Amino acid sequence: MQIDQKKIDEAVSTIIGYGGTHILDCVGCGACSAVCPGVKAGFDVLCRKLIRKIVTGHLEEIIEETSSWGCQACNRCTEVCPQGVRPQEVVFAFRRYQANELAFSTSSITSQMNLFETGHAVFTDPKANRKKVGLPEEPPTSAYNEQAQKEIQTLMNNSSMGELGLF
Ligand code: SF4
Ligand code: SF4
């Protein structure tokens, strides 16, 4: 298959521009993928595989890929990489690229909306369960604190996500 150097250059410079600064130092050893909990959980286009897709010019083809949203930011990949690539930064650069193209996964939109409305990315109303075990129905979190919610919403409205018009 013919290599499209222009596509490769564009893909690499896009990811470097979003913060994946050391992507070209990857030698494809796979140490990062071997320790990545995201890969173990089935989000397989992370670490070595994600880097490989980008450096071969397949960035646009994977824009809808959901694996990036499975990254836990644990940085195990960064610790084991012998080349100083910092794969987690490549993953987040890829996420930024996806976000700026409005290519969010459904679960990430849901978690952002939950965060905006309650201050929790994952939120289930706990009142009934708390009542059952004799606890005050509303725990002391942002979900039941109007002032805290307003502050979270102000922060999110002024973030890069807010600038995209998500909220
Ligand atoms: S930071 Fe993300 S990509 Fe790196 S090992 Fe952890 S889950 Fe995997
Ligand atoms: S550990 Fe580093 S050099 Fe090896 S595949 Fe991962 S990013 Fe590339």
Image (cartoon, rainbow, N blue to C red):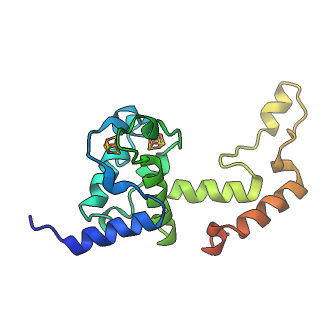
Residue drawn at x 51%, y 66% as measured from the top left: 99
| Left or right: where 19 falls relative to 8 | right
> Does 24 appear above or below 13?
above
Q: Residue 32 appears in which quarter of the rendering?
A: top left
Q: Nearer the viewer, residue 29 or 107?
A: 29
Q: Nearer the viewer, residue 109 or 86?
A: 86
Q: Residue furthest top?
A: 133
Residue drawn at x 60%, y 56% as measured from the top left: 110
Residue drawn at x 39%, y 62% as measured from the top left: 64
Q: Nearer the viewer, residue 29 or 50?
A: 29
| Left or right: where 38 falls relative to 158 | left
Image coordinates of residue 98 in percent, x first then y, are: 46, 65
Image coordinates of residue 42 in percent, x first then y, are: 38, 40
Image coordinates of residue 161 in percent, x first then y, are: 62, 67
- Figure disc tally: 0
Residue drawn at x 43%, y 60% as measured from the top left: 94
Q: Nearer the viewer, residue 68 or 130?
A: 68
Q: Quadrant of the C terminus?
A: bottom right
Q: Quadrant of the N terminus?
A: bottom left
| Left or right: where 115 falls relative to 24 | right
Image coordinates of residue 60 in percent, x first then y, are: 33, 68
Q: Residue furthest left?
A: 1
